[in-house]
Amino acid sequence: MSSAFLIYGATGGVGSCLARMLASEGHRLHLVARNAAGLEALAQELGSDWTAADVLDDASFARVAERAPRTLDGLVYAVGSINLRPLARITTADLERDYRLNAAGAALAIQAALPALRASTGSASVVLFSSVAAARGFPMHSSIGMAKAAVDGLTRSLAAEFAPAIRVNAVALSLTQTPLAGSMVASPKMRDAIAATHPLARLGQPEDAAHLAAFLLSSRADWITGQVMGLDGGRGAIASK
């Protein structure tokens, strides 16, 4: 059965992979991203509607809601940042931007789409993206760790508030090979060293995240809500050898 999904961050590594996966299954998509040129190209490829929007602009969420389908079966917020600095170099602007991009933006996106999600005839689903750094401490992750921990709290709070009509879950990633992580994986030596810190001895791929997100959006996951699911090669739960 075809469903309607709204995807924020649709031109990113995970967002674009998920969009292609859902489109191949016959679902209807409304794609959102800041990069208008890349977004239009992806939308044309998939035959999807789209809205160029910057989640740092408060007015963008209402504009997206006006153009998106009036009935939504799911929303994905695949917007994020990787801001790694020692605390001594973190600025107020860093903290505010990371929180807005990762947590507050997710809340505002869901708020604007709430009437459409409530109009779904099935169990609508929201999928957010967190990080292994929200639950496990890593050096130089203070700003992003705080922001992603807020995503975890948002996930559980909204799951409780919206049950049983709307399910809310998050996928907590470790380092995944996307353009966002480009500077961290550009060097083969660095890439191999980071991969070795994972018990499964590799970095994540966009397809890993897309498959789990697609499952959480589907009716196969209709008894799952309020969960922050680790997708991290085991890094968050067990030690590497």
Image: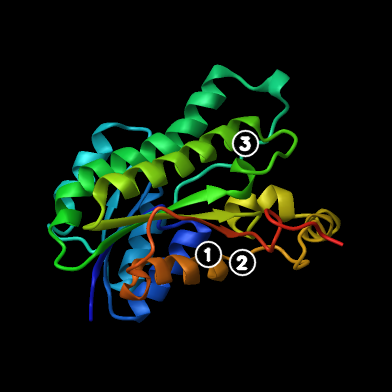
For residue 16, the mark is none
Percent position (x, y) of residue 211?
Answer: 48, 72
Q: Which residue is mark 2?
A: 205
Residue contact at pointers 1 and 3, CB within 8 angstroms: no
Which element carries disc 3, helix, strand or loop?
loop
Seen at 44% across and 40% down, the residue is 153
Q: Residues within 10 Å of mark 2 (few under 14, many from 20)?
A: some
The answer to whether any part of residue 7 appears in the image is: no
Q: In the rendered view, does 180 fall on the left or right side of 241? A: left
Would you say 231 lies left or right of 17 here? Answer: right
Residue appearing at x 21%, y 58% in the figure: 165
Contact between labelled residues 3 and 2, with CB atoms less than 8 Å apart:
no
Foreground pick, 5 / 215: 215
Left/right of residue 144 with respect to residue 5 in the rendered view? right
Mark 3 or mark 2, which is nearer the start of the sequence? 3
Task: Identify whether 11 is placed above or below 158.
Answer: below
Q: Is residue 23 above or below residue 231?
A: below
Asked if disc 2 and disc 1 are in contact, CB closer than 8 Å, the reply is yes
Residue type highlighted by circle 1: Ala
Could you tell me how far apart the alpha carbons at marks 2 and 3 are, in whole angstroms?
20 Å
Q: Badge 3 local density, few (<14 within 10 Å), some, or many (20+)?
A: some
Point out residue 108 in the picture as x, y percentages from the top left corner.
30, 38
The three-letter amino acid code for the residue at tag 3 is Asn
- For label 3, the residue is 83
Q: Helix, strand, or loop for circle 1?
A: helix
Instruction: Name the foreground residue: 182 vs 123.
Output: 123
- Residue carrying label 1: 209
Measured as percent of width and height from the top left, residue 91 is found at 60, 19
Quarter-of-image position of residue 221: bottom left
